[in-house]
Amino acid sequence: MHSFGYRANALVTFGVTILAVMCAMASLSDNLNFPSPTAHIQVMNVNWFQKQPNGNDEVSLTMNITADLQSMFTWNTKQVFVFLAAEYETPQNSLNQVSLWDAIIPSKERAKFWIHTTNKYRFADQGSNLRGKEFNLTLHWHVMPKTGKMSADKIVMTGYQLPENYR
């Protein structure tokens, strides 16, 4: 016959094993979600485009940002961090990224949105490299789960160009 301590140990070990298996199954089930987010960004206006006294170019844009990120939300999604970046090349760097706007989306109900905004952060380049420059607008997102690893992805939108002259 087994002692009380031996029986308690067996019961606790069995309970923890079942809990671990359930957590693993829950975490793996989140990998079965294949999100299909959509986004569209329209540059409505170049508010101003100027050369700063220190020689750097700076731009202010008015944009319409439309996105449907609802497919990223599952039972395990705590929130989604989303940001819009302008990406372009210069002779010094093959990739320059400037964050223009960001937001935290706390729920699926708020994951489908349309925003009319100016860039939240300065779109500046170190030097005079922005005149007539073609650039991409890239919507990045990071899915922050309740449990498990974070995931990230992006949508790249091409075909944008800055003016040749300062305004």
Image (tube, helix red, strand yellow):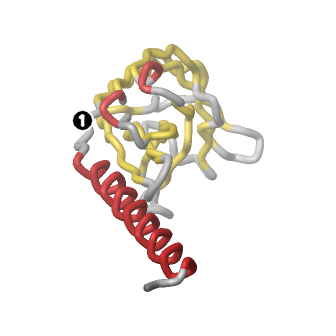
Residue beneath the point at 53% across and 73% down: 8
Residue 57 located left or right of residue 75: right
Q: Can you say whether 1 is above or below 58 in the image?
A: below
The part of the image, by quadrant, that contains residue 50 is top right
The part of the image, by quadrant, that contains residue 21 is bottom left
Report the amino acid beneath label 1: Ser
> From where the camera sits, is residue 42 visible?
no
Q: Which residue is mark 1?
A: 36
Residue 64 x %, y %: 44, 17
* Mark 1 secondary-structure assignment: loop
Residue beneath the point at 35% across and 57% down: 22
The part of the image, by quadrant, that contains residue 167 is top right
Residue at the farthest right position: 53
Residue beneath the point at 50% across and 39% down: 78
Residue 19 x %, y %: 42, 60
Residue nearest the viewer, comparing 73 with 111 = 73
